Amino acid sequence: MQTCLNEMKEVYSAHHCSLNVRVTNVGALGLYRDLLGFMVDKEDVEYYADGENAYEMIKYFNEEDEKKAKENALKN
């Protein structure tokens, strides 16, 4: 997975990567947040067909963008 993230940044000049994870998916949350450095950006209510909410998660490839996002999150 880290290789894919590196390719997004280097080959495609991506600024960030985002994904959605069920709020109850402890394994995925651990992987993306704790191991790969994604941050929870917001919670999407009833995102899935069964009505479960999802966390929208994002990983910035630029430290300055990540810093700005964290500052904005603290303001909200």
Image: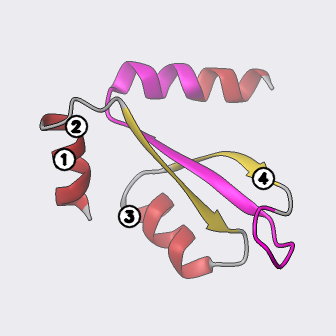
Q: 36 left or right of 38? A: left
Question: Depth-wise, is mark 3 or mark 4 nearer the camera?
Answer: 4
Q: Which residues are magenta?
A: 47-69
Image point (67%, 21%), residue name: 72
Amino acid marked by disc 4: Asp
First reached walking from the N terminus: tag 4 or tag 1? 1
Image point (57%, 50%), residue name: 57
Q: CA distance from mark 2 to mark 3?
A: 18 Å
Amino acid marked by disc 3: Leu
The image quarter in which residue 14 lies: top left
**Callout 2: SS:** helix
First reached walking from the N terminus: tag 1 or tag 3? 1
Labelled disc at residue 35: 3
| Residue position for label 2 | 9
First reached walking from the N terminus: tag 2 or tag 3? 2
**Callout 4: SS:** strand
Labelled disc at residue 70: none
- Residue 48 falls within the magenta-colored stretch: yes
Amino acid marked by disc 2: Lys
Q: Position of residue 2 (x, y in %)?
A: 23, 59
Q: 10 left or right of 48? A: left
Does residue 41 lie above or below 33 as drawn?
above
Does residue 33 lie above or below 22 as drawn?
above
Question: Depth-wise, is mark 1 or mark 3 nearer the camera?
Answer: 1
Where is the C terminus found, in terms of image quarters? top right
Q: 64 left or right of 47? A: left
